[in-house]
Image (cartoon, grey):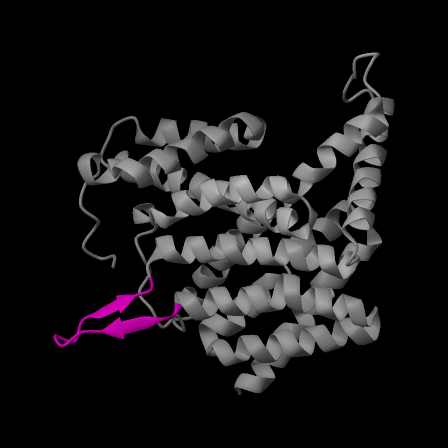
Amino acid sequence: MIPIVGIGAGLVSALLFSVVITGSPLAAVLYSAAPLPIFIASLGWNHRSGLFATAAGALAVAIALAPTGGIAFALIIGLPAWWIAYLALLARGDTDGRVEWYPLGNLLLWIAATAALATVGSALVMTTDYETYRSVIARMIENLLNEMVRGKLIALPGDVQVKELAQSLAPAVPLGIGASFVTTITANLWLAARTVKMSDRLPRPWPFIPSTTLPRQALLLLIATGFVATTGGFIGVAAMAMAGALLAAFMFSGLATLHDISRGRPWRLPMLISIYVALVVMQAVLTPLLAIAGVIDTLLGLRKRAALPPPPNHS
């Protein structure tokens, strides 16, 4: 049963991954859901299903598109989804028979690390020469900026050259890619877990998500990646991607903080509605603020002082 489910999930995931070549907006949405079948198979039918799904999907993409496409599928979609699902179901028992599941904060940190590795993997699949990679990224940014200028979506000062601006922005692109990978992996994991839970196949009890707090090691890692990101080359790409992934993880931690400390408050609902609307309308402004809130919570433990105890029906 496990191989059959895994192969089926892998083929569906490969199809979602492959439609991105059409370049349509719908294809981009479907591509972002590519990890979902592998998450569902791994969470509901054992993590080995995720490995079968990764292998089947990579083989299908390699045959249908190109061998490099199969490698990209495995590095960007399959292996990250399998590994995160595997960690989500890790547990250990004590002498009293109580079960401790893998902490959500540690899981979020692993999501950030996986996102950084996926970012570097996607770059290396493109090319193993850093200067070629940087020129390709700069050209993509230049084309995008030209389209935005022609469509009057942005207006650049007269002394700013689009090509030079694109060259200066290129090194920061892995920051955004790493952050977007964290969002994609986290959203797919949550949706898959909800789906599997509805079918009563989720092995672990549903966790109390607002309690999610990143470990303090994440702060040291963020500082270290900030320094390494200035070195250039693919090492710099990896560090920049990890910094972006960590900032996204801290953003989710900050959002969890707001959920946690607002429980039982009369202003909870309007505050949360305002936050989520602002995330859509003013994402560039609110995301850094939420990341700062997550950093402060990790550093000072705000929730230990302000939040109510977790509900008794959650672990």
Residue 205: quadrant of the picture:
bottom left
Name the one closer to the observer, 288 or 306: 288
Please provide percent x and percent y for residue 39: 53, 66
Q: Which residues are magenta?
A: 89-102
Left or right? Give the position of 159 relative to 14: right
In this rendering, is residue 60 above or below 308?
below
Please provide percent x and percent y for residue 102: 33, 64
Please provide percent x and percent y for residue 148: 81, 27
Residue under the point 81% across and 18% down: 160
Quadrant where the image shows the C terminus: bottom left
Q: Residue furthest top?
A: 158
Residue under the point 68% across and 50% down: 29
Q: Residue furthest left?
A: 96
In this rendering, is residue 56 above or below 134?
below
Left or right? Give the position of 220 relative to 155: left
Residue 194: quadrant of the picture:
bottom left
Name the one closer to the observer, 225 or 73: 225
Left or right? Give the position of 266 relative to 159: left
Answer yes or no: is residue 180 visible.
no
Please provide percent x and percent y for residue 263: 25, 37
Residue under the point 50% across and 32% down: 287
In this rendering, is residue 152 above or below 92?
above
Left or right? Give the position of 69 relative to 146: left
Residue under the point 59% across and 47% down: 241
Answer yes or no: is residue 252 visible.
yes
Q: Is residue 63 magenta?
A: no
Total labels drawn: 0
In this rendering, is residue 264 above or below 33?
above
